[in-house]
Image: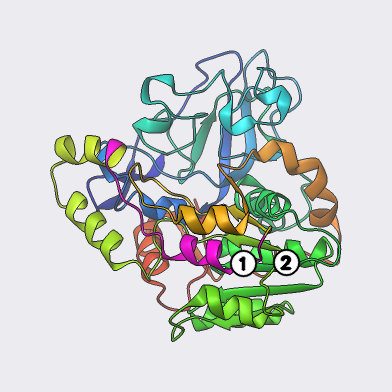
């Protein structure tokens, strides 16, 4: 089969690799019909590159048609159309039964000190081949795959694999109530959905913050108030002034480790990225610094007693944090990978609604054949050609 593979920093290739096969009774094989490029995939080109190996298959936002199932898989069958969550979880361990699927104890990576195994995401998270490929082996398929109707476009459901549940969890964890004011830092794919979900769940005012014109325009198209931070020195203070001199009740930070306004963090990433993998890997795992501009602005911009929900991915171990600010202002913070299956029952009515309140069909800007995946990564990372979301078609 054809698949997108890693061959070194910024060297991605689409090439032939062995077809996947059933290895465990709980496996399934899915013929991929769509597979998106995620913002988290971009981290593999810089910070997390040392944990990849030549030939690793990337991608963790796939959907497709079931080809084959193991004997312990009974809730799906060949011919079913399914979305595959990015985290691989069993559904029955101590963590899963408490709704913490991203910490699944069956697939947890204890040797590296990390949570549940992820598709296409380095040695740190299990090194399971990903879904930017023609076929995908799905471990723990007795629980993971989400059956969806067969008579709608893929993108009506594709983003259930990651970014819609991630945005839903981020908004929920920002303690959004009816009538709340919410700010969302970063209007990439997760941030776009977070603004729409906050509005859908009853927020009275939703403010999206970014500097990319196409992202700001997309949010405005969905009735979101926007703040262009390209020429604002203190975004946190600007947000407080914008919302009653107090700040929003909840803030979603959907930027993560690639914040633009963090030159020292960017320099540190560049230095580590230039080192040989054998040297860079332990540094990235134990001594890494992040670009914290967006996170610090979120902390300083939320109202006193408010909540900051962090869905942006971070990888640092020795990052400085504004502890006095956090303590004095009495804020609550929540972090972490999305527990995808925890939220699906809550999200599905909105996704199935013909009115499309979450705008699932208005996010993708680029549809590309799998063979053009390296180009898709390039324009997504560089924010070129108006790129907001890339969907690959194997």
Q: Is residue 85 magenta?
A: no
Side (left or right) of 296 relative to 344: left
In the image, 124 versus 18, the foreground residue is: 124
Side (left or right) of 138 relative to 296: right
Q: Position of residue 343 (x, y in %)?
A: 74, 42
At 40% across and 56% down in the image, what residue appears? Answer: 257
Question: How many neighbours does mark 1 have within 10 angstroms: few (below 14), some (14-19), or many (20 or more)?
Answer: many
Question: Tag 2's secondary structure?
Answer: helix
Q: Which mark is residue 184?
A: 1
Magenta span of residues: 286-304
In the image, 289 versus 360, the foreground residue is: 289
Question: Tag 1's secondary structure?
Answer: strand
For marks 1 and 2 on the same chain, the one whose residue lies earlier in the sequence: 1
Q: Position of residue 388 (x, y in %)?
A: 52, 69
Is there CB contact under 8 Å for labels 1 and 2? no
In the image, 218 versus 36, the foreground residue is: 218
Q: Position of residue 364 (x, y in %)?
A: 58, 67
Q: Which mark is residue 196?
A: 2
Residue at the bottom extreme, as displayed: 231
Side (left or right) of 349 relative to 231: right
Question: How many neighbours does mark 2 have within 10 angstroms: few (below 14), some (14-19), or many (20 or more)?
Answer: many
Q: Quadrant of the N terminus?
A: top left
User: Which callout, 1 or 2, points to the residue nearer the camera?
Assistant: 1
Query: What is the number of callouts on the image?
Result: 2
Q: Is residue 89 visible?
A: yes
Q: Is residue 359 visible?
A: no
At 40% across and 59% down in the image, what residue appears? Answer: 292
């Amino acid at each position: 089969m054809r698949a997108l593979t890693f061959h070194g920093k910024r060297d991605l290739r689409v090439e032939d690799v062995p077809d996947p096969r059933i290895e465990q009774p709980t496996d399934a094989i899915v013929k991929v019909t769509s597979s998106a490029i995620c913002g988290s995939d971009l981290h593999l080109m810089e910070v997390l590159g040392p944990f990849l190996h030549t030939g690793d298959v990337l991608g963790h936002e796939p959907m497709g048609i079931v080809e084959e199932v193991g004997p312990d898989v009974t809730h799906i069958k060949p011919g079913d159309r399914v979305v595959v969550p990015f985290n691989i979880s069993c559904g029955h361990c101590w963590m899963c039964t408490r709704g913490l699927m991203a910490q699944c104890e069956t697939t947890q990576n204890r040797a590296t000190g990390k949570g549940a195994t992820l598709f296409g995401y380095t040695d740190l998270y299990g090194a399971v081949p990903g879904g930017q490929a023609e076929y995908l082996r799905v471990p723990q398929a007795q629980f993971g795959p989400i059956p969806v109707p067969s008579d709608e476009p893929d993108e009506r459901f594709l983003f259930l694999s990651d970014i819609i549940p991630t945005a839903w969890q981020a908004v929920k964890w920002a303690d959004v109530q009816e009538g709340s004011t919410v700010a969302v830092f970063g209007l990439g794919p997760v941030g776009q959905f977070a603004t729409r979900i906050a509005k859908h769940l009853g927020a009275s005012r939703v403010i999206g913050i970014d500097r990319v014109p196409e992202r700001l325009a997309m949010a405005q198209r969905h009735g979101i108030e926007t703040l262009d931070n390209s020429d604002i020195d203190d975004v946190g203070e600007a947000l407080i002034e914008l919302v009653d001199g107090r700040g929003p009740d909840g803030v979603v930070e959907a930027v993560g480790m690639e914040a633009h306004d963090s030159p020292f963090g960017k320099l540190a990433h560049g230095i580590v990225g230039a080192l040989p993998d054998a040297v860079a890997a332990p540094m990235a795992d134990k001594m890494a610094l992040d670009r914290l501009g967006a996170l610090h602005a979120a902390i300083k911009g939320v109202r006193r007693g408010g909540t900051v929900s962090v869905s942006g991915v971070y990888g640092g171990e020795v990052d400085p944090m504004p502890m006095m600010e956090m303590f004095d202002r009495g804020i609550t913070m929540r972090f972490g990978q999305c527990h995808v299956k925890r939220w699906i029952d809550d999200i599905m009515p909105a996704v199935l609604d013909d009115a499309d309140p979450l705008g699932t069909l208005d996010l993708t800007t680029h549809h590309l054949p799998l063979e053009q995946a390296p180009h898709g990564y390039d324009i997504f990372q560089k924010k070129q050609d108006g790129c907001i979301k890339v969907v690959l078609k194997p």
